[in-house]
Image (tube, helix red, strand yellow):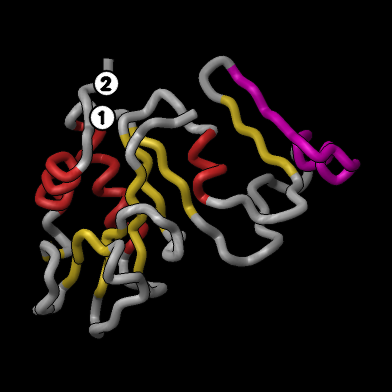
Amino acid sequence: MSTAPVVAFIGRSGAGKTTLLEKVVRELTARGRHVATVKHHSHRGFEIDREGKDSWRMARAGSRHVVVAAPDKVAAYRTLERELGLAEIVAGIDDVDIVLVEGYRDSDVPHVEVVRGTPGFVGSPERRVAVVTDLALDVDVPVFDLDDVAGVVGFLEAMLPLQPHA
């Protein structure tokens, strides 16, 4: 069970969440942190596998849980009867210092809201801990420029109980 802190990066489609998260992961990793990421995909039926691959063939044959294992990584996916909640997903993540989530705006974890181009929030003000934007916004949480990745990471390190990875 994961005890790592979890932070969700939320915002409208096209706001730059993925780009920002990629930079934040790089910066945290450069600082010696072990990071996990979770991407919420809101549409049913996405494919993680490629047509014709052995794992794809096993899933199409009826396997409900498919695992591909190699000497340096493992990947697994399974068929679900219902969508898992963020807490259920994060519970299976271990050996990391922080879990960064893209999406899950209705979750009970702290939110960093990404706003680009036009003002407007999608998340709950109660869970909003920071805003990353290219606009001049008057909010009651820290505001960072879209290019201030070091500032965002410094904020996360100060806000959360991040311990150096052993």
Position above or below: 35 against 69: below
Is 140 in front, or is 154?
Answer: 140
Is 95 in front, or is 25?
Answer: 95
Is residue 56 a member of the stretch shown in magenta?
Answer: yes
Q: Tag 1 or tag 2, which sits nearer the N-term?
A: 1
Q: Which residue is mark 2?
A: 165
Label 2 packing within 10 angstroms: few (<14), some (14-19), many (20+):
few
Tell me how far mark 2 sits from mark 1, CA to CA: 6 Å
Per the image, label 2 sits on a secondary structure element best described as loop
* Left or right: residue 130 compared with residue 81: left
Is residue 1 a member of the stretch shown in magenta?
Answer: no
Q: Give x and y (percent) for residue 108.
A: 40, 56
Label 1 packing within 10 angstroms: few (<14), some (14-19), many (20+):
some
Q: Which residues are magenta?
A: 54-70
Q: Give x and y (percent) for residue 1.
A: 49, 28
Is 103 in front, or is 85?
Answer: 85
* Left or right: residue 135 compared with residue 124: left
Q: Which residue is mark 1?
A: 33
Which amino acid type corresponds to the residue marked 2 in the rendered image? His
Q: Residue at x 27, y 56 (%)?
A: 20
Q: How many marks?
A: 2
* Left or right: residue 29 compared with residue 60: left
Q: Quadrant of residue 127?
A: bottom left
Which amino acid type corresponds to the residue marked 1 in the rendered image? Arg
Q: Residue at x 20, y 32 (%)?
A: 30
